[in-house]
Amino acid sequence: MLFPTTIAGSLPKPEWLAEPNVLWAPWKSAGAELERAKRDATMLAVKLQEDAGVDIVTEGEQARQHFVHGFLANIEGIDFAHKVEMGIRKDRYKAMVPQVVAPLKLKGRVHADEARIARTHTSHQLKFTLPGPMTIIDTIADQYYGDRVKMAFAFAELLNEEAKALQADGVDVIQFDEPAFNVYMDEVSDWGIKALERAAEGLTCATAVHICYGYGIKANTDWKQTLGSEWRQYEDIFPAIDASSIQQVAIECRNSKVPLELLALLKGKIVQAGVIDVASDVVETAEDVVNTIEAVMKHVPASNIVATTNCGMAPMHRDIAEAKLMALGAGAKLARQRFG
């Protein structure tokens, strides 16, 4: 199939799950009720994608509060009770983050429930997202290892453990989200790719890395205003990614200032081309999606293109996100008709 569709990972949570302090306050002690709500939200996310014509679905990250901290929550050696303020993405913004205070070890499975729920309720291919090692260490304070690289590889080992288990659960594509890859350029080539490959070591399912310039918060929007008319940061890291064992690269292509000719540097990869803008409430038409796919085809063989979203959709209003999903499915279908 030309131009199969997927999403970057996250979807907006239903209102009854997205506002737990309001709607779930009476049931805070009733963990089973919250787990049931997460299950139901996961099933709904899968159904919405199927109805929109998305071919490779995700569980929508419905059971996670944060794309990084959702993975960290089931790891020994992390102190969530005493968060500290830390600069994120080279001090682009500040955040209160947990601390690594002891050797890292998985307490058990992290995402088994949502992966198995999604796998049970869809016959589509299933993609699951995990944070990448470099992005994790850029989102947590180190009070134990004293070495960024050592800590990154410690997390890579845990990611690999969970990724292999997800593969056994029936996941078809495992994607590591590495927005930090467009911030620490030298480190990507020095050790970031190696840590990513360690996280994916031994997997026989498809593997992907998602990179982006950041969405959803004002700090990212303000930073992008300083980058000029062309965003060429990927030019520094695409050759290293292309030489890696990771098979797919998810990248924003719709309404970004990334020169699409840079995609030619990923000559050995499947390109998950972002054809839906998650930074705008304007809903794309099917023709918009076709036009973006056609622009990407100038630099990437059609057989190597997967149509996706620029990034996760969690910060968006749900009705807009659903409309954009419909545009994604309709646009890819139209592109297949038009281009073969």
Image (cartoon, grey):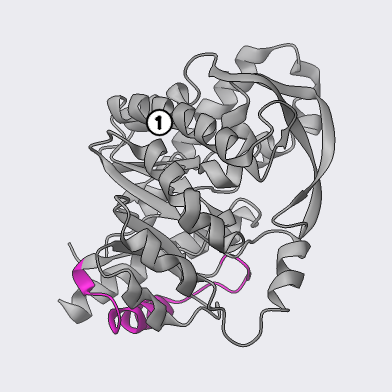
Dot 1 crowding, Cα within 10 Å, few <14, some 14–19, many 20+: some
Indicate left or right for 241 with 142 as reference.
left
Q: To which quarter of the image does residue 329 belong? A: bottom left
Q: Is residue 284 above or below residue 1?
A: below
Residue lying furthest bottom in this view? 229
Q: Is residue 251 above or below residue 289?
A: above
Q: To which quarter of the image does residue 217 belong? A: bottom right
Q: Residue drawn at (55%, 63%), measured in percent from left and top?
A: 185
Pointer 1: what residue?
160
Amino acid type of disc 1? Asn
Residue 44 place in picture, x, y as percent: 48, 39
Residue 142 place in picture, x, y as percent: 72, 33
Based on the picture, tell me whether residue 289 belongs to the magenta stretch.
Answer: yes
Residue 119 place in picture, x, y as percent: 33, 31
Magenta stretch: give its range.
Answer: 278-303
Q: Quadrant of the C terminus?
A: bottom left
Q: Is residue 239 above or below residue 230?
A: above
Q: Residue drawn at (71%, 64%), measured in percent from left and top?
A: 220
Nearest to the observer: residue 158 or residue 42:
158
Nearest to the observer: residue 189 or residue 139:
189
